[in-house]
Image (tube, rainbow, N blue to C red):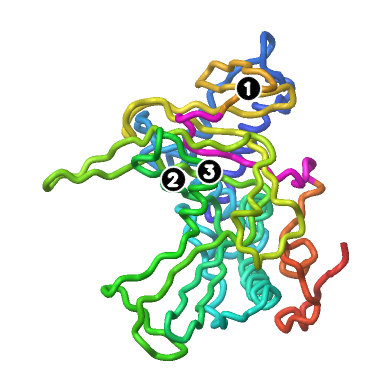
Amino acid sequence: GPAGCIVALVYAAVLHNLFGLAEGQCSSTLGPGGRCFAPMDFMVVLSRFQPYLATGEMQDSQELLAWLLGALNEDLNRAGGANVVGLDASPLRATSPCLLGMSGGPREEERHAAEAWFRHLHTNRSIVVDLFQGQLRSQLRCPSCKIRSVVFDPFLYLALPLPARPPHGVVSLDELVRHLCSEECLDAANLWVCPNCGEHVEARKKLDLWKLPPILMVHLKRTSFVQEGHCVWTRKLNCLVEFPQERFDFRPLLPPETIHKDPQLYDLIAVVDHLGGTVDSGHYTATCRRPDGWWEFNDSHAKYLGAGANVVSNKNYVLIMERRSAPTEPHAIDRQLPNEPHAWPHLIDVDWSFLIGEECSFGG
């Protein structure tokens, strides 16, 4: 990266301290013999790139996580180029939109998705891509000629807006994903010129989850903007988002035409909670699943919650979910490389034109 991988180096030092790899300075298990440490070197480096962190005020934990993953992606990019997914996780447009008819089959769309991923990997190859990046399908549909303009983009996390007034103060994670992926109609002020029929139309816009990563980060957007007269103020949404902590099945939430190599079952492995009545104040804690059960980390204090603890609450702000088929050892992680399509999340056809001429490995 442009900073000489300094973020990756100081973050590695934090991990060494956390997991007791730095000359036995810390215990690998928390308890009477465990210790805490202040990651001052890490904070100093972060404040160089994000000066607001040096103020000591509360900052948004999800923004920090997205920034950190973006910085690690840049530092550890095996492609050695720029154009990585940025700090705000804005999608990198890897290909131009493709025009598909309503009769376009799953294999046709999978081909376009795989080609977009192939082009993405030419400039983005890191452990962050391997573990945290998935793929979205966004499309505009012409109501007149039915043609669809489709683009496949990488994503780093899902941002799910919460409803302001859910029934009984409870909403399910399924509902939030379905709302994100619901079709909307562009209004007359945002007419789309159909590239097929040339008409100015109120296009139908839709987003879909096409490929989910081994580790999925979900941001529950608890901020609501309320306008009173000429004033706009923020309000925290305290509704409970319900979902099972184990074996959450994303398959019914994905488009039926997408193809998956593995069951889309996810377990919750960590949450970031926000404690406080407003979005501009309060305190963050982390709760993580370790081999012996769930632990709550609150600054210098760690508390064992038990193996069967329920950590789903209306304080959840960021969810970290892991696919059940995800590798547990570093050497088993499928490295995403342009010339190894067998490791991609897509079902590959060796005759696809964009792979012809590439020195690709199609073996298992």
Which three-letter amino acid code belongs to the residue tagged 1? Answer: Ala
Instruction: Tell me, yes or no, whether the highlighted magenta stretch contains residue 45.
Output: no
- Relative vertical location of residue 319 with respect to residue 36 in this rendering, above or below: below
Crowd around label 3: few <14 · some 14–19 · many ≥20 (10 Å): some
Q: Residue at x 41, y 44 (%)?
A: 162
Q: Which residue is drawn at 58% across and 17% down?
A: 302
Gap between marks 2 and 3, in whole Å? 34 Å
Label 3 near label 2: C-beta < 8 Å?
no
Provide the residue designation for mark 3. 173
Residue 137 placement (x, y as % from top left): 55, 66
Provide the residue designation for mark 1. 309
Label 3 near label 1: C-beta < 8 Å?
no
Residue 16 showing in the rendered view: yes
Tell me where residue 34 sits by quadrant.
Answer: top right
Mark 1, secondary structure of its residue = loop
Q: Quadrant of the C terminus?
A: bottom right
Front label number (1 vs 3): 3
Mark 3, secondary structure of its residue = helix
Mark 2, secondary structure of its residue = helix
Front label number (2 vs 3): 3
Provide the residue designation for mark 2. 49
Q: Residue most toward the bottom? A: 197
Residue 122 placement (x, y as % from top left): 65, 69
Q: Which of 85 and 22 is in front in this view?
A: 85
